[in-house]
Image: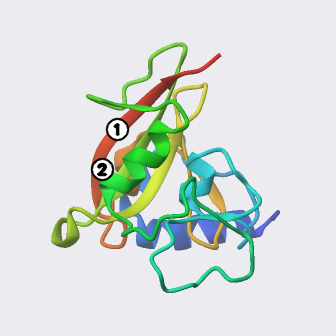
Amino acid sequence: MGERVEQIKNELICYFPELKNDKDFDITSKATSKYNCIAWAYNINDRWMWPNTGNYDFLDGVHYWPTDEIQLPSIENFIKAFRLKGYECCDNGDFEQGYRKIALYARPDKWDICTHASRQKNNGCWTSKLGENCDIQHGTPYTIESAAYGKVRCFMKRRFV
């Protein structure tokens, strides 16, 4: 990445203006289309994770969802998927020693449809995969709220050993 890091950071700040004042903001990977934000939050980095909506967008075989049902990409279905990994809904994204947290996002105009997920790291910072772009670290889940991702819709946590 080298000298392009600052250029990429500036481009990302255009989409996520709150990153400008985020002292923890950093680029942590090169761009890749191997996985998406949901997979990254689920701790998968070799395939996309999205419910089968019946549109068969994932005929290439690198798609994952924990059930075979045809489903909407609703917040409710994402909560169910993360519950299968041991997560439960919680009140906030504050760091708690011994727990891993995730944030699910939705746009206010489609409040029931999940648009993004981020995961809290062991150092209390957050990490997000930005579509087919890079992974980033950010200080809070709120610094990537945007027109595209919307706002944090809910938090979930699980014991991390």
Query: Residue lying furthest front in this view?
Result: 69
In the image, what residue occupies the spot 49% across and 86% down?
55
Q: CA distance from mark 2 to mark 1?
A: 8 Å
Q: Secondary structure at mark 2?
A: strand
- Decide: marks 2, 1 in contact (CB < 8 A)? yes
In the image, is residue 147 above or below residue 102?
below
Residue 118 image offset from top left, x and y in percent? 49, 48
Q: Secondary structure at mark 1?
A: strand
Image quadrant where one finds the N terminus: bottom right
In the image, what residue occupies the spot 40% across and 56% down?
144
In the image, what residue occupies the spot 45% across and 76% down?
53
Determine which residue is flagged by label 2: 152
Tell me the number on the disc at residue 30.
none
Q: 124 left or right of 44?
A: left
In the image, is residue 130 above or below residue 156?
below
Residue 117 image offset from top left, x and y in percent? 46, 53
The local crowd at label 2, few if under 14, some if 14 to 19, many if 20 or more residues have their Cα within 10 Å, is many
Determine which residue is flagged by label 1: 155
Query: In the rendered structure, which amino acid carries the disc numbered 2?
Result: Val
Residue 139 is at least partly visible in this image: no
In the image, what residue occupies the spot 42% across and 71% down?
15
Query: In the rendered structure, which amino acid carries the disc numbered 1?
Result: Phe
Query: Residue lying furthest left in this view?
Result: 109
Displayed quadrant of residue 68:
bottom right
Front residue of 119/5: it is 119
